[in-house]
Image (tube, rainbow, N blue to C red):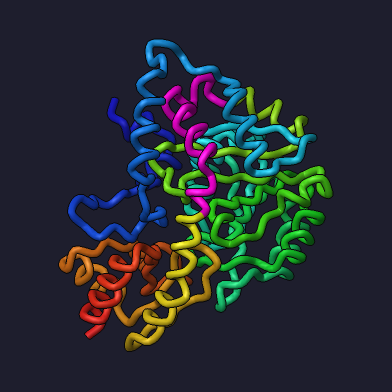
Amino acid sequence: MKPADLVRPEILALSAYHVAEAEGMVKLDAMENPYRLPEHLARELAARLARVEINRYPNPAAPRLRARLAETMQIPSDCEIVLGNGSDDLIQIITFTLARPGAVMLTPEPTFVVYRMNANLAGMRFVGVPLRPSLELDLEATLAAIRAEQPALVFLAYPNNPTGVLYDEEQVAEIIRAAPGLVVLDEAYHVYARRSFLPRIAEFENLAVMRTVSKMSLAGLRLGYLVARPEWTVQFNKVRQVYNVNVLTQAAAEFALEHFDVLEEQAEQVLAERPGVGEALAALPGTTVYPSQANFFLVRVPDADRAYQSLRAQGVLVRNFNGAHPMLANCLRVTVGTPEENRILITAMREALT
């Protein structure tokens, strides 16, 4: 028998998540922070990692790392933390935990494609509620879908990816109140949005806040964390792979959080560049730049495929969303980089659009 005879039909219908080759490119496709650790901290980190006992399995509870996260991120004391191998791991854990027969996952669309992928993998029925043409949240349609579908799980990216839009806080709160199941706010870009529901988590029994350190110069560590009430986390930990966060990641993340001020300074540098990049992109012929509270911009151009290939030929890698969703037709997503990377981007984009 062949794979097509044995693999579930919904898996056969999927496409693997594609990551473009980036060697030698100005890499502005993945919303990474462009700054590395300062040299003196890199040396200290190397010394710290050299002492890690890689011959031993990691402590699954990671008590020191969770305590450091709780202190640094001011996580409420009545909540627990679940660690993941990046946000993708946490999304899978949450989805598999709630994937009872007939259960529904609901989210506004377009949004992070991994939500829908995991619904398919877990056998949940996926319901996408279209955003408004402005890419803002359609509150009335979302509330109507919640009433009709009674979802077990709602994902809200806050700000949204790939649009960069930060939804109105009270509209989000209204969705949380209306949802009969769990609402997960994906705050991957909180360091740039400077808005969070963590201070309000005690208001809602059905709220979990998910974050990652990937957008703070630590993308290579693959560390995500979920904050929720203990009655939720005890269930998620049953699904979590026991050794999902390795010893090197735990040690490196602890070290980085000890120097959180450096990570915040790097985020400030990106924020300082963001307005200028948005204005420069908007000034190019034929572009529409959507407002962003993240470290990237969604840009609609006359011909995204042609512009993407032209940028690649010039050594600049961005993300092409043309064909991914009807509302993302001819859209590119570009990360805010260093001043030099941003200068190269604008020059290359100008060339690509002429």
Q: Is residue 8 left or right of 172 when viewed as pictured?
A: left
At 33% from the left and 85% from the top, the residue drawn is 284
Place of residue 103 in the rendered image (x, y in percent of width and height, measured from the top left): 67, 42
Please state the extent of the stretch shown in magenta in the rendering.
240-264
Q: Could you tell me if residue 120 is visible in this image?
A: no
Place of residue 243 in the rendered image (x, y in percent of width and height, measured from the top left): 49, 20
Question: Closest to the observer: 39 or 73?
Answer: 39
Place of residue 288 in the rendered image (x, y in percent of width and height, measured from the top left): 43, 82
For residue 193, above or below residue 199:
below
Q: Residue furthest right?
A: 203
Q: Residue furthest top?
A: 55
Q: Main secondary structure of the magenta part?
A: helix
At 37% from the left and 79% from the top, the residue drawn is 281
Q: Is residue 210 left or right of 268 when viewed as pictured?
A: right
For residue 301, above or below residue 324:
below
Residue 260 magenta-highlighted: yes
Q: Residue furthest left?
A: 313
Image quadrant in which you'd find residue 293: bottom right
Residue 18 magenta-highlighted: no
Image quadrant in which you'd find residue 202: top right
Q: Could you tell me if residue 169 is visible in this image?
A: yes
